[in-house]
Amino acid sequence: IAKLYCAEQATKVALDAIQIHGGSGYMAELPLEKLMRDAKMLEIGGGTNEIQLQTIARRLLA
């Protein structure tokens, strides 16, 4: 559950930061684009969020 929550929040925070900085948020000169890539890797690594939700549901129902 923690992996799912942290991955979703990291992506949300990175997207908000990019939105605040506008177009320059996507530029490689700022660390925001790397933070966004890293946040997306948190969602994918160890299974996508959908797979994590299925695993959590399966274990709760078992």
Image (cartoon, grey):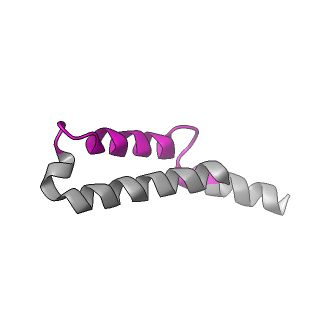
Quadrant showing the C terminus: bottom right
Magenta segment: 27-52
Determine the residue positioned at 34% across, 46% down: 36
Say whether residue 51 is left or right of residue 40.
right
Q: Which residue is drawn at 79% across and 55% down?
A: 59
Q: Nearer the viewer, residue 61 or 20?
A: 20
Residue 43 picture location, percent across and down: 49, 46
**Front residue of this view, candidates 51 and 39:** 39
The quadrant of the image that shows the N terminus is bottom right
Where residue 37 appears, as percent x and y from the top left, is 35, 41
**Relative image position of residue 3 (x, y in whole percent):** 61, 48
When the figure is inspected, residue 52 is found, relative to residue 60, above or below; the finding is: above
Q: Is 34 a magenta residue?
A: yes
* Residue 7 relative to residue 11: left or right: right
Q: Position of residue 4 (x, y in %)?
A: 59, 53
Give the answer, above or below, for where 62 lies relative to 33: below
Above-or-below relation of 24 to 45: below
Look at 52% across and 47% down and name the residue there. 48
Q: Find residue 47 and report its image quarter.
A: top right
Majority SS type along the magenta span = helix
